Image (spheres, rainbow, N blue to C red):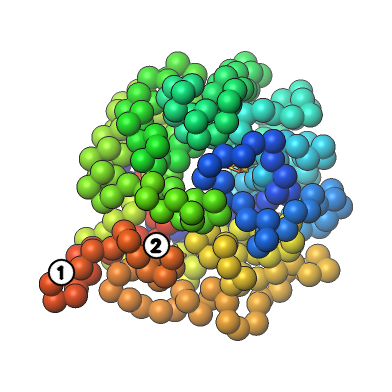
Amino acid sequence: MKKTVSFSKNTANVFFHVLTACNLRCRHCYINPEQHGQDTLPITTIEAWLECFADRNPGANLIFLGGEPTLHPDLPQAIRTAKKLGFGSVTVDTNGYLFHDILEKVTPDDADFFSFSLDGASRKTNDAIRGAGCFDACTSGIRNAKQKGFHTSLIYTVSRLNAHELFQMPKLLKDLGIDRFFIQVIGIRGKSAQHTDIQLSRREWLDIVPKTAEAAAELGITVTYPKVFLDPKEPFECAGRVADNYFVFPNGRVYRCPLCEDFPLHGMRLENNRLIESRKISENELFLLDISEGCVMNRLIQPENLSYSQDRKAEYKIACCMLKEEISN
Ligand code: SF4
Ligand code: SF4
């Protein structure tokens, strides 16, 4: 079954970067210390900020991120606090190294998902992007998590560096026992902003991604991938206007749109453990602009992926990066 998962007011998502430190140096890392800070949040602050979001959006989905969030020694306590505060689901996004024996310190009742990042079906391709030894560390982390009864998902960020191996992923996912597969488009932010030539063209994306998603779904895996391209007549919506997503960084910035994260455009901030709207101008003003190319931020930071007819009409629109297709069998 294939469906487009539009964002809704009823499902809020909190993407909580508890630190920006990481043991890896991936080529496409989106963390930008100048904009996101280099702090490791104390557990008291993490818990206070969790309370802010639990009050504002009861039952929101919570995703702990970094850097590498398992480098935070108090992550188990943060996970348990989040459960007590009533978050709808709690996920830990990890590069697979699983520091501080995290799998020993929480149970599948505390953490709903461990979500692993892998960017190649082979050691060679993945490690060229993420660093030597990462393929083995990540796949063994997945096996350990499965053995302890955790649900697992896997995130594959597609670029020209690894698109050729995407079609090999369904078999690997099945072998590893992965429950959910997230295919991501490489964002032009953080370090990737220096490598704009590694994004797939529209043709390449449409040739490779939907077919692989279907192949994985046939093996019983739920697959989610961004819609990216909309025909001119398809409806466009900016999640910044209609949905409740929060991308929270340790310096207190709270963005509503991930494409704004390289700029001081955050629509909100946490100050004295309270969530405050930013003064103008912020991303909120950009969300209000209606343009024929769809997503305003895409038009500003990655116009190379647009195409125009001779009379300067956009040939397609770029969808909001949070609009996804979901396929399950
Ligand atoms: S694991 Fe994540 S945070 Fe760490 S370097 Fe790679 S992309 Fe960046
Ligand atoms: S990605 Fe584009 S459409 Fe989506 S929230 Fe950001 S500005 Fe709006």
Q: Distance between the residues labelled 1 and 2?
A: 18 Å
Q: Residue at 51% x, 80% y: name it.
A: 285
Q: Which labelled disc corresponds to residue 21?
A: none
Q: Residue at 54% x, 24% y: name it.
A: 135
Residue picked out by circle 1? 309
Q: In this view, does 221 lie to the left or right of 130?
A: left
Residue 23: x and y in percent read 69, 36
Residue 301: x and y in percent read 43, 65
Residue 97 occupies which quadrant of the picture? top right
Quadrant including the N terminus: top left
Mark 2 residue element: loop
Q: Residue at 37% x, 50% y: name it.
A: 197
Mark 1 residue element: loop
Which label's residue is closer to the chain start, 1 or 2? Answer: 2
Residue 225: x and y in percent read 39, 44
Residue 125: x and y in percent read 44, 28
